[in-house]
Image: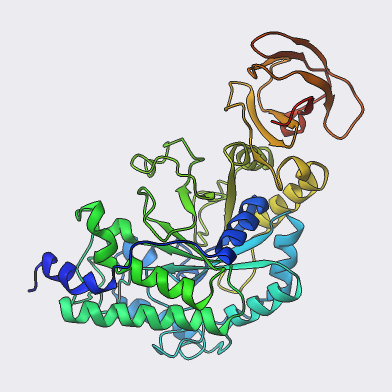
Amino acid sequence: MTSILGVCLLLNAYAQPGYSPSAENLRSREEFSSMRFGIFVHWGIYSMPARGEWALHSLNFSHDEYSRLAAGFYPSKFDADQWVDIFRSSGARYVTITSRHHDGFSMFGTKQSKYNIVDGSPFGRDVLKELSKACQEKDFRLHFYYSHLDWGREDFWPQGRTGHNTGRKPGDASSWKHYQDFMDAQLTELLTGYGPIGAIWFDGVWDFDAFPREKQPEMWGLYHQYELIHRLQPGCLVANNHHLVPFEGEDIQIFERDVPGDNTAGYSGESGISSLPLETCQTMNGSWGYNIADKNYKSVDELITLLVRTAGKGANLLLNVGPRPDGTIPEDAVERLAAMGRWMQTNGDTIYDTLGGCVPEQSWGVTTQRGNTLFAHVLSDDRVIFIPIEGKKLKSATVHGTATKIAYTQTREGVILTLPSGLEGPDRILDLVFKEVL
């Protein structure tokens, strides 16, 4: 079998360093960063076993048998307009949906394989086409998730850490080039047939972590893919959930299950924080895809706190939902999204179009800012807090959205504030207006 080095030599032609983002790309980055809240959708035939999106791998299914699920996939209650209405009412401003996950089933009418929702299921409808239409009509941004992995195709090579027990027989270096061409063709379809796309969200590079970081772009042909995306839609952003320092050509840095700077999930140990637009992706319960046994949903206060902490780091929150095989979104998720939307109606101006606060995260909470206004999100039960902002003179301090004044003392090192009683949970937000722009 051809060596790994041979693969790198084969793919060297794909490397196109020296990326300089276009004016359209820079505008897209700015718009993306202003949105602060998006919805992630993990949906495919893996919703049918109802054990999450990794069912093919985690349950050791044979891919031959697993692929037969497509013949019974009929999401009769799928309504793209209803989905977008639910997402918009949450306060989110974009959606990222799985176009093809690691199981290899395409959720769009691709011409590159019959293993897709149009040709391979009795449903026969292109759900991504319908979602694209609904997003355009409702002025909602659409992003596509796309997996670099495929646990079923035999031209996907070499074998990584996952998908070993599916019955697939990996090919060789020549078949790997064929798989690269397959991905290019699918990406071209997504970027030429589904209207304006805000971002392509890649996943799977982490599967072959034995390969040195500096060789990963050559291994996967990333620079070639990034150039293809930017050429087909200059305003389309590139994100890659590889858990590494961003590569050249990427426009967004992703943090899986953690706000930037944290590493509780173990995926951010090597990434640091770049100057790119930032995004945290997180589940609403413990699963990405629909899992009938997972009722461990985070509370509304927990989700709002996550959104606030993410914004305080200058990042967007991409919050996941896993629709059922019939196309409906679980009621637990819908209820929480509606509650978040009500909170955003009152407090969204402290989240949208803000920067991460110049005051780093404190034991009491986080800050966001706009101009000369610092929004202090008090997430603890503290009644007295200290804002360590040296050299800035406070002009006024009020409870957000009210005229209620906050008692404060200005010191050389910052400001000491005493909060009034009656404020609870994530509604404890203070508007601190300074005399100078922050």
Farthest residue toward the right?
A: 403
Residue in the foreground of this view, choosing between 228 and 295: 228
Residue 89 in view, yes or no: yes
- Horizontally, residue 64 falls left or right of residue 191, namely left
The answer to whether residue 306 is above or below residue 288 is above
Residue 272 vertical placement versus 375 (above, below)? below
Question: What residue sits 31% from the left and 70% below the top?
Answer: 61
Q: In which quadrant of the rendered image does the N terminus lie?
A: bottom left
Image quadrant holding the C terminus, namely top right
Q: Is residue 73 visible?
A: no
Residue 107 in the image: state x and y as whole percent.
50, 78
**Residue 341: percent from left, percent from top:** 76, 51
**Residue under the image location 49 percent in, 62 percent down:** 21
The picture places residue 55, in percent across and down from the top left corner, at 39, 64
Q: Residue at x 52, y 52 (%)?
A: 294
Q: Nearer the viewer, residue 366 or 85?
A: 366
